[in-house]
Image: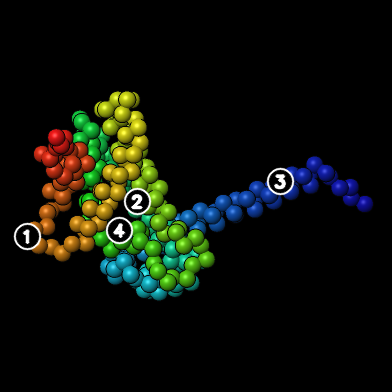
């Protein structure tokens, strides 16, 4: 009668565990690759079809079914979140690259504003898709999820803006710097999106002029010649 070998059994179980773990790792890698492919094709579809494109429209343009997109992203808000993380991450890296050669805080601000406007202008449809929620879209996730990537992005950009300004103004201005980046981001985003959505006309500034104008507003205000005067 054969005698069981505990050591051999342990080795066999370990090998089986490694095999299962290996398959799980390969499957996870496959899912990640497929997920990136779907985000890439969805981005192309939104660029061509517009920011209001439905999941069905996006899936058709990607040559698959919308059930595939639901399987990977949960719902449209999930797709917006995933695409937003990729695109806004690219935008943030480009803004960081743009500031490396800046010699002054103002040049750094101009570089960041320019990079932001350039990326948004390159595909207004995609920018709108990842920065705006979709009213009425059924979702099992947090209804604010679509703006999550954008929120993290602007938090990071706020810190990018604050760092050179702290170094320039000194620690005694820390209280002011604490408020200023958030206000600056609001100005950049709102002015930039208004500019992005404005129809082309002789009165509309080009991207470079708009970036300089926003930077001027951030650094010196809208009317620096106006000064507070005391009343007698």
Q: CA distance from mark 4 to mark 1?
A: 24 Å
Q: Please tell me which of labels 2 and 1 falls first in the chain.
A: 2
User: Who comes first in sequence, dot 2 or dot 4?
Assistant: 2
- Residue 222 in the image, given as x and y percentages of width and height: 16, 45
Query: Is residue 76 visible to the viewer in this orientation of the structure?
Result: yes
Disc 2 from disc 4: Cα separation: 9 Å
Give residue 169's quadrant in the image.
Answer: top left
Whole-percent x, y for residue 20 in the image: 65, 53
Question: Can you name the residue that lies furthest to the front here?
Answer: 232
C-beta proximity under 8 Å, tags 3 and 2: no
Q: Horizontal placement of 231 versus 18: left or right?
A: left
Classify mark 1: helix, strand or loop: loop
What residue is pinned by disc 2?
88
Callout 2 secondary element: helix
Q: Which residue is mark 4?
A: 127
Q: Is residue 23 above or below residue 52?
A: above
Q: Earlier in the sequence, mark 3 or mark 1?
A: 3
Q: Which residue is mark 3?
A: 14
Q: Around disc 2, counting alpha carbons within 10 Å, would you say few (fewer than 14), some (14 to 19), or many (20 or more)?
A: many
Residue displayed at 25% across by 42% down: 112
Q: CA distance from mark 2 to mark 1?
A: 30 Å
Residues under numbered marks 2 and 1 in contact, where contact means CB atoms less than 8 Å apart: no
Q: Between residues 37 and 218, which one lies in front from this camera angle?
A: 218
Residue 78, image x, y percentages: 45, 61
Towards the viewer: 162 or 223 = 223
| Separation of residues labelled 3 and 2 (CA atoms) | 43 Å
Q: Earlier in the sequence, mark 3 or mark 2?
A: 3
* The furthest residue to the right: 1
Q: Earlier in the sequence, mark 3 or mark 4?
A: 3
Residue under numbered circle 1: 202
Q: Nearer the viewer, mark 2 or mark 1?
A: 1
């Amino acid at each position: 009668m054969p005698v069981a070998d505990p050591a051999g059994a342990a080795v066999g179980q370990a090998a089986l565990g490694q095999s299962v773990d290996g398959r799980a790792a390969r499957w996870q890698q496959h899912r990640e690759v497929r997920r990136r492919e779907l985000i890439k094709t969805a981005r192309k579809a939104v660029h061509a079809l517009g920011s209001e494109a439905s999941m069905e429209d996006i899936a058709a343009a990607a040559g698959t079914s919308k059930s595939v997109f639901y399987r990977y992203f949960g719902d449209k808000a999930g797709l917006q979140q995933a695409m937003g993380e990729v695109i806004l991450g690219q935008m943030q890296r480009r803004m960081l690259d743009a500031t490396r050669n800046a010699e002054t805080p103002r040049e750094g601000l101009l570089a960041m504003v320019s990079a932001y406007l350039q990326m948004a202008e390159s595909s207004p449809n995609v920018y709108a898709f990842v920065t705006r929620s979709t009213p009425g879209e059924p979702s099992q996730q947090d209804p604010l999820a679509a703006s999550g990537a954008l929120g993290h992005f602007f938090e990071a950009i706020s810190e990018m803006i604050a760092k050179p300004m702290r170094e320039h103004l000194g620690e005694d201005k820390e209280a002011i710097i604490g408020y200023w980046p958030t206000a600056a981001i609001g100005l950049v985003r709102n002015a930039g999106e208004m500019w992005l959505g404005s129809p082309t006309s002789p009165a509309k500034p080009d991207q470079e002029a708009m970036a300089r104008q926003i930077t001027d507003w951030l650094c010196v205000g809208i009317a620096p010649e106006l000064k507070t005067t005391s009343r007698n």
